[in-house]
Image: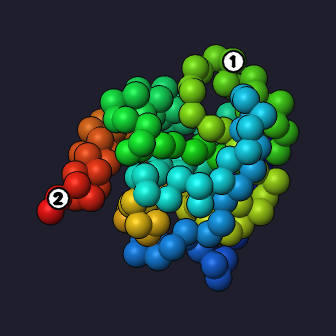
Amino acid sequence: MILRALLLCWCIPFAANAANVGQTPPALTGMDLQSGQAVDLDALHGRVVLVDFWASWCAPCLKSLPLYARLRDEFPRADFEIIAISVDEDAADAQAFLKRVDVQFPIVHDDGSRASAWSPPGMPSSFLIDRQGLIKSRHIGFKPGDIDALRDEVRTLIEASHAP
């Protein structure tokens, strides 16, 4: 677990195909740990999507995931979705975490390929994607007050797509 955390902090930022603001994000598919259903970022094209990389050993993630769950409920599903990617080495660690933290959005366990492609610079890291499928912002770390700024970003992206 510690080795993986160090790799996330030091090695991933040097990946050539990192997810960068203004670009199309890397492919993202997997199985939802909670429902067993397929998850595909491409299937959400036309919605604003928050992709969040987290881990059960990440203290700020204990705070961010419940707040993200509330944020998701503030907007229609047709406008906004969240996909959370667990970078835990063992999916059982993520599942145990999810028993303590109630979230109803898709959670995908990473085998290492997703973090390698997206290059999250720390834990947690999130990427906000607009309806056209471009990364509009990247957030590193989390403090409870961050949710207000994120809410404003999501609202702005949703409203921009409804403007004449």
From the image, tell me which residue sits under label 1.
99
Q: Position of residue 164 (x, y in %)?
A: 15, 62
- Mark with earlier residue (1, 2): 1
From the image, tell me which residue sits under label 2.
163
Q: Is residue 59 left or right of residue 161?
A: right
User: Would you say residue 53 is visible in this rendering?
Assistant: yes
Q: How many marks?
A: 2
Q: Position of residue 123 (x, y in %)?
A: 57, 49
Q: Residue at x 59, y 74 (%)?
A: 18
**CB under 8 Å between discs 1 and 2:** no
Of badges 1 and 2, the one in the foreground is 2
Q: Is residue 109 left or right of residue 150?
A: right
Judging depth in this view, the residue of 127 and 93 nearest the camera is 127
User: Would you say residue 119 is visible in this rendering?
Assistant: no
Q: Residue at x 51, y 43 (%)?
A: 82
Q: Residue at x 42, y 42 (%)?
A: 78
Number of the label disc, if any, that sits on residue 126: none
Q: Position of residue 107 (x, y in %)?
A: 66, 38
Residue ranking furthest to the bottom: 16
Q: Does residue 91 lie above or below 87 as drawn?
A: above
Under mark 2, the amino acid is Ala
Q: Position of residue 12 (x, y in %)?
A: 67, 68
Q: For mark 1, does the 10 Å Cα neighbourhood hold few (<14), some (14 to 19), or many (20 or more) residues?
A: few
Q: Residue at x 46, y 66 (%)?
A: 133
Q: Secondary structure at mark 1?
A: helix
Q: Secondary structure at mark 2?
A: loop
Task: Answer with the quarter of the image where residue 102 lies.
Answer: top right
Under mark 1, the amino acid is Lys
Q: Quadrant of the N terminus?
A: top right
Residue ranking furthest to the front: 164
- Disc 1 and disc 2: Cα gap in Å? 40 Å
Q: Is residue 89 left or right of residue 126?
A: right
